[in-house]
Amino acid sequence: MNIAPEPLTICQPTRKSETVRSVFGFRHRGLIGVLLFAPVGAAVVFSAPTVAAGSALGLMLNVGGWLAFLAYAGIRVWATLYVGGRKDRELQTDGPYSVCRNPLYLGSFAFAVALACFLQSIAFGAVLLPAILLYLQCVVRAEEHFLELRFQEDYRNYCRRTPRFWPRWMAFHTSPEVRVDLKRLNKEGIRLASAALAILLLQAVIFLRAASDWPHWFSVP
């Protein structure tokens, strides 16, 4: 896949950008996610549940949620081992980056799927599609544009042989040794612990949501 030149927007870096963190879309990627998911998430929490507590469907969704969360944690740690602290200096093409170009974002998508399963909400699940499209436009594409400016033909060749998201497992390769940035790995561990705590708090809220005295202000499936 060759990346065609595109007009620069607020989501893309200029040629004077020194690091990927100077890109607006990358720097505010967390805020973009919150703005997308928080409103519908709050509406779902304060609406009556549509899946009966203890039902087979509810159990399946909870299991699916935990599996998606474990996928999120595993992918994030695996990718951080390879790229932590080096994204601006080295073009990483080994390990998870040999099977897809954006494993960290793939992990974040798995976390969004986990939230949709735990909330047991069609509406929240439906928000995933526009969220993914916006991320592609304002975050992932901006980062790819930066990497192309930084690594030029090496990055274009990497794009031709490696899919953006859907893993091509047959292409997996890795060096016998990996240099790990312990500071970045520690930060990722803290992020994952915070995410796990958020999931546990969400589980408690979902339990309370089924109570008759919980405020059911909305009707969101």
Image (cartoon, rainbow, N blue to C red):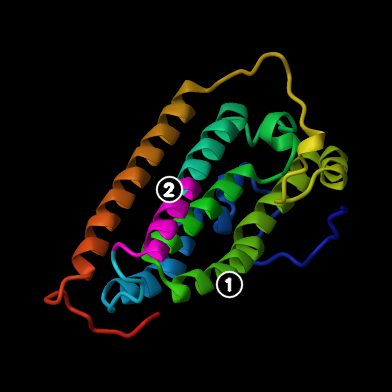
Indicate whether 82 appears above or below 59.
above
Numbered mark located on residue 16 in the image: none
Residue 189: x and y in percent read 41, 33
User: Does residue 44 belong to the magenta stretch?
Assistant: no
From the image, tell me which residue sits under label 1: 130
Indicate whether 114 appears above or below 159.
below
Numbered mark located on residue 66 in the image: 2
- The structure residue drawn at horizontal position 75% and vertical position 33%, both measured from the top left corner, is 93
Mark 2 / mark 1, whichever is N-terminal: 2
Is residue 172 visible in the rendered image? The answer is yes
Query: What amino acid type is highlighted by mark number 2?
Result: Trp
Near mark 1 (Cα within 10 A), the count class, few <14, some 14-19 or many ≥20, is: few
Part of the protein shown in magenta: 54-68
Q: Nearer the viewer, mark 2 or mark 1?
A: 2
The residue tagged with tag 2: helix, strand or loop? helix
Residue 188: x and y in percent read 44, 35
Q: Quadrant of the C terminus?
A: bottom left
Q: Is residue 68 left or right of residue 166?
A: left
- The structure residue drawn at horizontal position 46% and vertical position 69%, both measured from the top left corner, is 36
Residue 170: x and y in percent read 81, 36
| Front-most of residues 166 and 101 | 166
State if disc 1 and disc 2 touch (CB < 8 Å). Answer: no
